[in-house]
Image: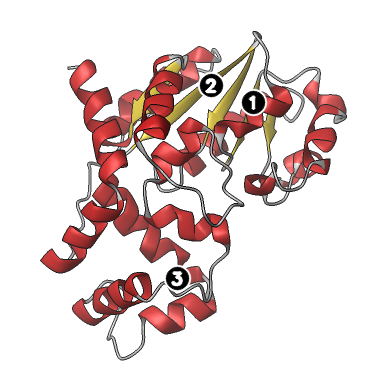
């Protein structure tokens, strides 16, 4: 059985992937292609797999595909149309949606153009003016500084990727049908962890691959945003909030 790690940005997946590198590139395919022993497995902008059909061929013709037990990347579950079958299952990590989006907004300021927009007249990343600029960016439907799949990260991203929507499509819509599909796919996953239980999540996933670990996290850091920003994020992420509550309530 092969397992795909649906790496949702800002859920702690990068650290986990760094530990999983110990499996080696023949057992673990990291589409990010880092560190150096993963370069042969790199598939750039895997989010665009539905738009660029050649990506599927590159995955399936990679000699490591036959031997791998795990593959990982910022892909939507539409990748299953390429690599799927009874032998392919999925895992993921969820995070409380408002905290995930807050962290994601700060992360994508690595884009210089986007950063210049959000940091305009602000004193630092995350101050009140920074968030006012973010609100204006969203309300004005600004597209500058970020790629399509990055802009999807502001609204219902967890629902989009778990339902298998096309992240290269600017105009995808999340509705009850999509939400229902996301729930169905989530229920069928081999394992779903929580960022809020990160130590347990990491150790559980490593045990799936017989990797010995005793990881302890350093405690959960909570970020705050202005009330108006939080309200906007809640409006943008209604289905992610529902999906997160669905999973956490089901597993209480």
Looking at the image, tell me whether mark 2 or mark 1 is earlier in sequence order: 1
Q: Which residue is mark 2?
A: 90
For the point 30% across and 91% down, the residue is: 121
Where disc 3 sits, the SS reads helix
Tell me whether the residue at label 2 lies in contact with that at label 1, contact meaning CB atoms closer than 8 angstroms.
Answer: yes
Horizontal relation, residue 164 to residue 22: left or right = left
**Residue 214 visible to the viewer:** no
Q: As drawn, is 164 to the left or to the right of 187? A: right
In the displayed image of the protein, which residue is found farthest to the left? 227
How far across and how far down the image is residue 41, in percent? 77, 38
CB atoms at circles 3 and 2 under 8 Å apart?
Answer: no
Badge nearest the viewer, 3 or 1: 1
Q: Quadrant of residue 62?
A: top right
Distance Cα–Cα, label 3 vs label 2: 30 Å
Q: Give the quadrant of residue 154.
A: bottom left
User: Which label belongs to residue 109?
Assistant: 3
The colour style of the image is secondary structure
Q: Quadrant of the N terminus?
A: top right
Q: Residues within 10 Å of mark 3 (few under 14, many from 20)?
A: some
Helix, strand or loop status at disc 2: strand
| 232 relative to 6 in the view: left or right | left
Q: Residue at x 81, y 18 (%)?
A: 66
Q: Which mark is residue 80?
A: 1
C-alpha gap between disc 3 and disc 1:
31 Å
Crowding at label 1, few (<14), some or many (≥20) Cα neighbours within 10 Å? some
- x, y percentage for residue 214? 38, 23
- Left or right: 62 with respect to 221? right
Percent position (x, y) of residue 29?
A: 70, 31
Secondary structure, mark 1, is helix
Vertically, is 123 above or below 58? below
The residue that appears at 30% across and 58% down in the rendered structure is 102
């Amino acid at each position: 059985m092969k397992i795909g790690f649906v790496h949702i940005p800002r859920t702690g997946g990068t650290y986990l992937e760094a530990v999983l590198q110990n499996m080696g590139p023949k057992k673990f395919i990291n589409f990010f292609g880092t560190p150096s022993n993963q370069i042969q497995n790199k598939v750039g902008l895997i989010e665009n797999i539905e738009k660029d059909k050649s990506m599927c061929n590159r995955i399936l013709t990679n000699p490591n595909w036959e031997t791998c037990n795990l593959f990982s990347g910022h892909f939507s579950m539409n990748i299953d149309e390429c690599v799927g079958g009874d032998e392919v299952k999925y895992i993921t990590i969820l995070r409380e949606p408002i905290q995930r989006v807050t962290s994601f907004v700060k992360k994508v300021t690595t884009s210089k153009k986007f950063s210049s927009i959000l940091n305009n007249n602000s004193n630092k990343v995350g101050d009140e003016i920074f968030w006012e600029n973010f609100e204006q960016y969203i309300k004005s439907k600004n597209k500058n500084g970020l790629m399509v799949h990055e802009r999807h990260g502001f609204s219902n991203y967890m629902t989009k990727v778990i339902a298998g929507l096309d992240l290269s499509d600017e105009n995808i819509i999340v509705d009850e049908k999509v939400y229902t599909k996301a729930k169905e796919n989530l229920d069928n996953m081999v394992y779903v962890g929580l960022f809020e239980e990160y130590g347990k999540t990491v150790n559980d996933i490593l045990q799936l691959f017989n990797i010995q670990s005793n990881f302890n996290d350093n405690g959960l850091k909570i970020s705050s945003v202005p009330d108006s920003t939080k309200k906007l994020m809640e409006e943008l992420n209604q289905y992610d909030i529902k999906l997160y509550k669905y999973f956490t309530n089901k597993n209480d």
